[in-house]
Amino acid sequence: MPIMVKRLSVKAGDADKPLLNGISCTFGNGDITLLVGRNGSGKSTLLDAIGGLVPFEGGVEVDGLPLLPVSRSRQSGAERLGQVFQYPEAQLFARSVQGEFDYSLRYLKLSKIEVTRRTERAMREMSLDKRLREQSPLLLSGGQKRRVALASTFATEPEWLLLDEPTAGLDPEASERLTAYLLERKAAAGGGIVMATHDLDLLLPIADRVIALRDGEIAFDVPASQLAVRPELWERAGIDIPLCAALASRLGMSGKGAPTSFPSPQEAAERLAGRLPGTTGAEHVTASAVVDGSGPNRRGAHSNAPEPEPDCGPEVLREPGQSLALGAPAGVPSSGASSAQPKGKQRRIGASAKGNRWVLLLDPRAKWLFYAALSFGLLAQRSWPGLAGGILLTVLLAFWCQVPWRSTFSLLRPFLWFMAISAVISGIGFGEGGEYGDEVSAGFRIGAVIVSFPAVASTLFEWLKIVCAMIGGIVLSATTTPFAMKRGIERVLSPLARIRFPVEAISLTGSLLLRFIPVLRREADRFNRIAKSRGKRVRASGAMRLRDVPAMLLPLMMSLLQLANDLSLALIARGYTGTGLRRTSSVALRMRGRDWAVVAIGCAVLAALLVVRGE
Ligand SMILES: Nc1ncnc2c1ncn2[C@@H]1O[C@H](COP(=O)(O)OP(=O)(O)OP(=O)(O)O)[C@@H](O)[C@H]1O
């Protein structure tokens, strides 16, 4: 049965335009389907959505099964998928190549003999030397990493393969082995293969269907053979005509209305060689050497191509932003595939400054001073009305600075959980009287357990102050580049340097910590993706399962240590080994009128918060 995608949309954070907009298509059983399109058109996002790695709206069914398990007894569609990411580094994490195979095969609960058999076979298929099994995958070459990523997925023998740029970085021999493997698999098993690729010369000749994306929408969805006679489709997707398609036309391989195939690079070379006077073999020529200036990679090379046959199979043609022009995608039912996922995709916060333009242009010192005043005022609160005022100010500030709430909330979420749990625990008491005995009138008792509301409220009160200060910090770091943050704090603290206060070390440590937070998040996301995709742990919430944490913890720590090591090398390279040295900076700070106004408002906020703080 096919993979059916129905009205699938993926949104990124608070961005107005979705990354994918209402994609409907069917990946046929036994087919090799190519996803093509320019950089950023949404190919990887579509593969990730089908693999359950990003939240989406709409439906995905794999062989009639929903992507997410609906009950413990029912299989999830994700178990039939094997996905290889665009960058092998994003997928490899184990201490050895063998560890990669073990992890991929773990969910199948195979015997040790079977694991060894499958590992050896997949390594042979991808021409990986047996001796690499004990090697760390991180120490392999780029092409070897790609092969390990492919082989460890092939070893699981999934019904469906989702491959993102599978030939990138492979040498010609490995690419050829890969195409041979894919053709062999296609002939043997059920399921199918979906590949996002730019390597059309190699993969178009083996494709059955081609789906082109443009700006997150389907530009065309046709049988591959159609492309030989309809070169205008390439233009519709904003892609130059691939060499193999231009050659197919110029070599007369596509008869009138009967396109058959695209030549593989070898076949094209042989045919070209056969046409050259005085040559008999392909060994003297390369395909590209004989293609004249009007040939491939020029739009319109097929201007005299024959008219298409009207009945060449199901197809979908669509201009981005328009409704379907021809027919509906084959096999998409009107109802059913509806494993709706939670909305929204986490936006990368802190990578660069975002938010209100006016705030972005402020001097970082003004922002630091305002933040210090606000935090001090918040932490000084002793009464609920005062805290309510502080919360209101913080919310207004975040709203005015236009920092996306979703990203702020996702950063705070673990802390909010911790806050809620610790507040509840602080309210629990045991026994008849004691510390909470007097307060049980404002709470409840279950047997010997007493839950005191005043105790819960007082813990919440303290935590809420910290949460507000944290929101202020998130707003500050989201609207200021890390470098400006460092310079800002350095200059604010500079008077203390006279009393030998380590200003530079403190500001550097602070800014590194701030930089490390997004890095930590990125690494945690990477391991979450690995657990979901390779461990077949797709969950609607997008969170990692508790039982996957131990397996991922050690590699995560190793990866963080590696990052810390890289960072310290970078610092040494920049000369941060001596203290007290005066460094030049490319960021010139200047306090203007509006910056002083912000400092004055900060002082006013502090004064107001101190007035209302209560006893
Ligand atoms: N986590 C994310 N947050 C915000 N935007 C994202 C995120 N991931 C991808 N995008 C954006 O989505 C768009 C589609 O990206 P995608 O990686 O799917 O493109 P692609 O077609 O695979 O490109 P390429 O050919 O370069 O691999 C891009 O504009 C990218 O910037």
Image: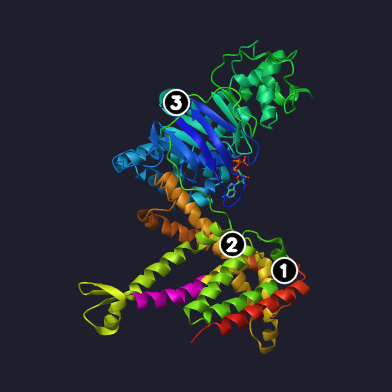
Q: Is mark 3 on a helix, strand or loop?
A: loop
Residue 287 location in percent, x, y? Answer: 69, 23
CA separation, marks 1 and 2?
32 Å
Report if residue 84 is visible in the image.
Answer: no
Amino acid type at image mark 2: Asp
Label of residue 566 in the image: 2
Amino acid type at image mark 3: Asn
Name the N-terminal-most of marks 3 and 2. 3
Name the N-terminal-most of marks 1 and 3. 3
Q: Residue furthest bottom?
A: 499
The residue closer to the viewer here, 593 or 454, is: 454
Q: Name the residue under label 3.
A: 29
Residue 53 lies left or right of residue 228; in this view the side is left
Q: Which of pointers 1 and 3 indicates the residue nearer the eye?
A: 1
Q: Give the range drawn in magenta.
A: 453-467
Residue 201 location in percent, x, y? Answer: 63, 28
Q: Name the residue under label 1.
A: 362
Report if residue 104 is visible in the image.
Answer: yes
